[in-house]
Structures are given as C-alpha cells and as structure tokens.
Image (cartoon, grey):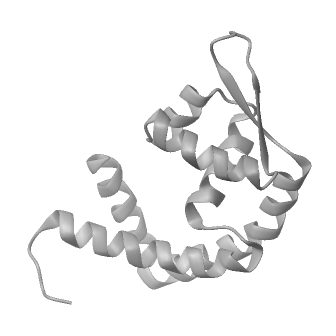
C-alpha cells in the first residue's frame, strides 16, 4: 500500500483490515461482521424499532433496512408491528439466537487477538479516539 497522511484513507484501510479478520472468523457460521453486529444489537436492545436500531448502530434507516431484510430472508430475525403502528420492531428468531451462540466464541477469539496485539493501554486510547471521531 502507498503511504498516506490522509486520515480518511488510513481509517478506511484499518477498518477494512479489522473487518476482514472478523468476516473470516465468522464465515464458519455463515455470517459477516456487519450481520453479527446487527444480530447482537437486536439481542442487546430486546425488540427494537427500526429507528432505534438504526440510531444505536449509527446507520441510516435505509441501509439498516437492507441489512435486516438479508437476515430476515435467512430466518434469523422477524419484523413485526411495534407499539406504534408506524414503527416496525425487529425480533430475533430461535435460529438467530442459535447463530449468535455459534458465532460468539469466534468473535471473542478475534477480539482477544486484536486486544493482545494492541495492549490494554493502546486499545483504551484507540477506543477513546474513535469515539471522539464518531
């Protein structure tokens, strides 16, 4: 790769490299990093509306909607009516819960590897800096 002083380019390179590691690990259970992240957000939020889920993930509703449809086609989530008839809720299916259980140890292994590579102090600083930029 060509050296660069462009923050955007370097962040995108790093993002692709890190994402590739998660994608490679999660491929064993038929998920990518983005799909796993979406499933985990749904799990952590309960039965979120599309709007709440999009906000929590930092995505626009249309991007999230496309990603939810992929998981719905795989039988991992269901869309249902929410408390407000205008809002749709995303619910994990039993298959979705099982897929998370299969994927979690793979995700945790990549987490451990990356954390070890950075060390606790540099990881904490990186997380702080990324939060500041987000």
Residue at the image point whose x is 41% and y is 63% from the top: 124
> How far across and down, in percent of the image, does residue 13 sit?
30, 75
Q: Is residue 31 above or below residue 109?
A: above
Q: Residue at x 57, y 28 (%)?
A: 52
Left/right of residue 9 with respect to residue 108 in the rendered view: left
User: Does any portion of residue 109 appear in the rendered image?
Assistant: no
The outermost residue toward the front is 73
- The quadrant of the image that shows the N terminus is bottom left
Query: Which residue is depicted at the point 22% across and 72% down?
Result: 10
Q: Say if residue 24 shows up in the picture.
A: yes
User: Where on the picture, by quarter, is residue 104?
Assistant: bottom right
Which residue is located at x 56 percent, y 45 percent? 66
Provide residue 132's location: percent of width, then percent of height: 28, 47
Q: Which picture quadrant has residue 15?
A: bottom left
Q: Give percent across and percent down for residue 69.
A: 65, 45
Looking at the rendering, which quadrant does residue 122 occupy?
bottom left
Q: How many marks?
A: 0
Furthest residue to the right?
A: 94
Residue 44 vs 95, above or below: the answer is: above
């Amino acid at each position: 790769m060509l050296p660069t002083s462009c923050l955007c380019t370097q962040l995108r390179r790093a993002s692709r490299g890190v994402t590739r590691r998660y994608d490679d690990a999660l491929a064993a259970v038929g998920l990518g990093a983005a799909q796993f992240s979406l499933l985990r957000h749904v799990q952590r939020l309960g039965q979120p509306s599309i709007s709440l889920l999009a906000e929590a993930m930092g995505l626009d509703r249309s991007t999230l909607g496309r990603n939810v449809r992929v998981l719905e086609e795989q039988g991992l989530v269901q869309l249902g009516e929410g408390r407000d008839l205008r809002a749709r809720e995303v619910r994990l299916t039993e298959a979705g819960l099982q897929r998370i259980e299969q994927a979690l140890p793979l995700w945790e292994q990549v987490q451990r590897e990356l954390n070890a590579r950075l060390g606790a102090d540099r990881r904490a600083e990186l997380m702080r800096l990324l939060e500041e930029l987000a």
